[in-house]
Image: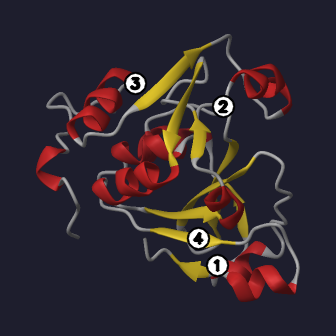
Amino acid sequence: MSREGGDKLHHRSDGQPMTRADVEDFLDSLGIKTATLDHPAVFTVAESTEIERQLPGAHTKNLFLKDAKGSLFLITALGSTQIDLKRLPKVLGCARLSFGKAELMSEVLGVPPGSVTPLALVNDRDHRISVVLDAGLMDFDIINCHPLENTATTSIARDDLLRFIRATGHEAQIVALGGGAAADAQSTKNER
């Protein structure tokens, strides 16, 4: 799979997952500017209310999912989006979905529960993850997500996040996750 900036994505020689510092270096190598706010650990969208007040832009929630056939998905949605896991397989064209186990998340994305983020795609070396972005995120110029740790939040421009995802060798599918028939019809492949 070809990637923009593919020659710049160097995985750690020790075989360990990339760290926050490694991701920051990779973003710098792509010429992507970000701003990061350090804060106490947060594990849920509800716990991040104070952070949302401090940072403009879209705040995300992320789901690491596995379907009944073993396919893996990273869903990044607006924090306020209600995601119907029963309807989602129809939208994505996959089998029944459930949450991926913590061990699998660590193996594929290199992060523990509570730190799931699209920035962890740098650790998916084998491109096992299908990336799904909530169409509602595309209405925001700035998107906020964890930099592989839930003790910080990184603000990144929407188009730069899409560029970062491509640079990791992934292509994001943009889907209206808010529910209903209109969301089913609005499911599109990212063309940015």
Mark positioned earlier in the residue sequence (3 or 4): 3
Instruction: Residue 42: give x, y in percent of width and height.
Output: 72, 22
Amino acid type of disc 3?
Arg
**Secondary structure of residue under mark 4:** strand
Describe the element under mark 3 as helix, strand or loop.
helix
**Mark 2 or mark 3, which is nearer to you?**
3
Q: Which residue is mark 4?
A: 174
Q: Are marks 2 and 3 in contact (CB under 8 Å)?
A: no
Q: CA distance from mark 2 to mark 3?
A: 15 Å
Q: From this viewpoint, which residue is outermost toward the left?
A: 7
Image-quadrant location for residue 170: bottom left
Q: Secondary structure at mark 1?
A: helix
Q: What distance separates the C-alpha of mark 1 from that of mark 3?
A: 30 Å
Tag 2 residue: 114
Query: Is 45 on the left-hand or right-hand side of 187?
Result: right
Does 175 appear above or below 4?
below
Give whichever of discs 2 and 1 has the lower sequence position: 1
N-term-proximal mark, 2 vs 4: 2
